[in-house]
Image (cartoon, coloured by chain):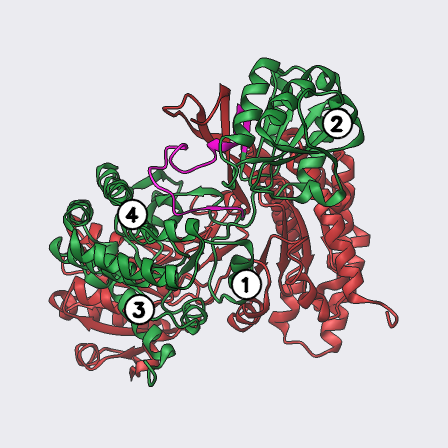
Chain colours: A green, B red
Amino acid sequence: MNAFNVAEYMQALGLQARAASAQMAKASARAKNTALRALARRLREAGEPLAQANALDLARAEAAGLAAPMVDRLRLTPKVIETVAQGCEQLAAMPDVIGDIVGLKEQPSGIRVGQMRVPIGVFGMIYESRPNVTIEAASLAIKSGNAAILRGGSEAIDSNKALAQMVRAALAEAGLPEDAVQLVATTDREAVGQLIAMPAFVDVIIPRGGKGLIERISASAKVPVIKHLDGNCHTYVDDTADLDMAVVVVDNAKTQKYSPCNATEGLLVARGVAAAFLPRIGAVFAAKGVEMRCDAEAAALLEGLAGQPRIVPASEQDWFEEYLAPVISIKVVAGLDEAIAHINHYSSHHTDAILTRDHVNAQRFLREVDSASVMVNASTRFADGFEYGLGAEIGISTDKFHARGPVGIEGLTSLKYVVLGQGEIRS
Amino acid sequence: MNAFNVAEYMQALGLQARAASAQMAKASARAKNTALRALARRLREAGEPLAQANALDLARAEAAGLAAPMVDRLRLTPKVIETVAQGCEQLAAMPDVIGDIVGLKEQPSGIRVGQMRVPIGVFGMIYESRPNVTIEAASLAIKSGNAAILRGGSEAIDSNKALAQMVRAALAEAGLPEDAVQLVATTDREAVGQLIAMPAFVDVIIPRGGKGLIERISASAKVPVIKHLDGNCHTYVDDTADLDMAVVVVDNAKTQKYSPCNATEGLLVARGVAAAFLPRIGAVFAAKGVEMRCDAEAAALLEGLAGQPRIVPASEQDWFEEYLAPVISIKVVAGLDEAIAHINHYSSHHTDAILTRDHVNAQRFLREVDSASVMVNASTRFADGFEYGLGAEIGISTDKFHARGPVGIEGLTSLKYVVLGQGEIRS
């Protein structure tokens, strides 16, 4: 690929994507669902060719000395394949929202005005290692009537090429344009720079990866970016919380899994229940080896825990931190006002929860906490497209613009105005 | 203002706006409506001080030799003041959408998930001459629970300062933060550069003005921009159109006013009705002095019109043109497919209409034309927030992202997820 011109190549992909998106926008629900089911079948029948492509990636990763967990993320096991195949079938079974007209109302002039849900057009997706994301993104593109240009990680390039070939075949089988889902077939980094700077061909960029990657892309993109930055999520235990429930929910929010962005990283406890609650949750954390970074008041209340609790004074930076690890910051607050102020200042506006029996406090928390997801009496771990009933998730947005929180099919669509008249004119 | 530091000044406005926005987000509907009614009353009672401020702007404009229509746009006549006062009262009478929860549904885990409408936060508005826009923007900020930083044209600076003072007084009267609406009090151009590059303080920029201004702002903004570029709108007369209706609607769409962005600039006529329709609409245009830029087929059918018709061959550039003048491009097309292809290629994706009796063609046009507003049997001039029942309009978006078409209160809001549980945990 020496004489290869990345800019020209990306422009060609863009032009083909734009053309395909016009076909996809008017594709019938039946054709899109046929493509999704065909893709599921082809994934299950893939067998040796896909395994061989995946083996190439795995061998390269091992030769490069990648850590075992990184290598594992590349592996297309029968279970991983079955999961993405089922995902395609679930999408096929969902209602098609494209073309829905909402809110049609007659206006004083006589015209009826509503809004029709239509695809955004073309989205570009930039992601790392796991090749199954290729199928998730492709299936969301198909169902939402968009075209997509996918740029996966170089580690997974052989698997991704094999998967993208199946997507093309499934689209063709359904009579849809093969270019509706295109994989960037070069691992040249310049391709990303091109992809994010083609407003004529790409309507939105969805990066999935670390905060650094997303900040870099946002800074130089010439099209909108659905940003998912960090998840510094909080759970606040209010004065009237049911403490038995609080122990179970806070434990789940922190320890059910440490790596997801919706895990609770900061625990706030109202002073009125701190003495009763903190030793109980502290014992749970101590037993699970969770380090507790505490303000002085919380630390004092956690003194004398059995076992070997890891209690450390919290620094100012701790309140901002997304640990993604067995670490939690803990602070005693006067009550709801201080909890809301703390969260609005330090949280990453991803997901924050209150545990309370007080209806007024619950309503105030929902209204006043400025985060993509606000919860009452539930684990922050629920912040997820599937748990929210979106059927699928292309990412989670920490932005306020366009899409906020888990982004499903609707986040890949826009509403255009529809006006139905009988010859009305403006006077 | 020599030692005046614009960057520091704008940062201070930003900080104050951000603080005020938190108060506005939780303000009651009653307080916001009180402020709006107080503003209407103050506008009507303004009398001499406002007239004097306006006179300063008018005198400066006249001394600078501005053309009479430009000077007129600055003039705060009693009629203009009454109109904006009524606008404030109309907004006060509208339901408050902030805090509405939509789509609350129980999920298999037991949690109930919905979405709450909340303000975006802080918007920056950049506009030219007309000082009444200051009140329109201020009243929309108040009703939508946002804070706003307004940057009006330097020609109107004295009027704008007097109006902004009334807005502050009305906010204070209602117990709301005065900084919820701040006017940039300097005419230094650097202030715009600062305003569009403060993502910590400003969530979205709404420019109102020429295409050049909006393109410059979009290119350098560090926050999302609700863009309103040009309005190259089309009306397509289909084979089955009611030709009596078509003459009335096309006439209205082109000639009711020439300057608005929703005026029709391109007329497409199906070949099957071209010979019957074009001479009729051509006679109307000829009588009104509208220049017709025609393809060869249309020109041939318009030969022999009575009077002094101005018929000119259309160039390729004409199909792209937003004339905002008594000029229209005219093309004969084979039928619906060619009309849709032409529109999707040349239109600015603002507003396009089909005139037809054919239900299938109407549905295809609505679905396949990729514009912010698509219409059947109505004048493109209806593309307007008031005509659409939005109650108010902060602008018209030609973007697909976030807001599309006329932007009212909802375009200044976002939806956050609300989760109501009873102690559910993720398994």
Q: Earlier in the sequence, mark 2 or mark 4?
A: 2
Judging from the image, what secondary structure is the residue with disc 2 in? strand
Q: Label 2, label 1: how many angstroms apart (C-alpha)? A: 36 Å
Identify the amino acid type marked 1: Arg
How many tags in the picture?
A: 4
Whether callout 3 and callout 2 share a subunit is answered yes
Q: Label 1, label 3: how many angstroms apart (C-alpha)? A: 22 Å
Whether callout 1 and callout 3 share a subunit is answered yes
Crowding at mark 4 (Cα within 10 Å: few <14, some 14-19, many 20+): some
Q: Quadrant of residue B125?
A: bottom right
Report if residue A385 lies within the magenta region: yes
User: What residue does disc 4 label?
Assistant: A421
User: Residue drawn at (38%, 25%), measured in percent from left and top?
Assistant: B107
Q: Which mark is residue A216?
A: 1
Q: Label 2, label 4: how many angstroms apart (C-alpha)? A: 58 Å
User: What residue does disc 2 label?
Assistant: A333
Crowding at mark 1 (Cα within 10 Å: few <14, some 14-19, many 20+): few
Q: Chain of mark 1?
A: A
Depth order, front residue of A311/A15: A311
> Looking at the image, which residue sits at the far right?
B3
Whether callout 4 and callout 3 share a subunit is answered yes
Judging from the image, what secondary structure is the residue with disc 3 in? loop
* Pair 4/1: label in front: 1
User: What residue does disc 3 label?
Assistant: A185
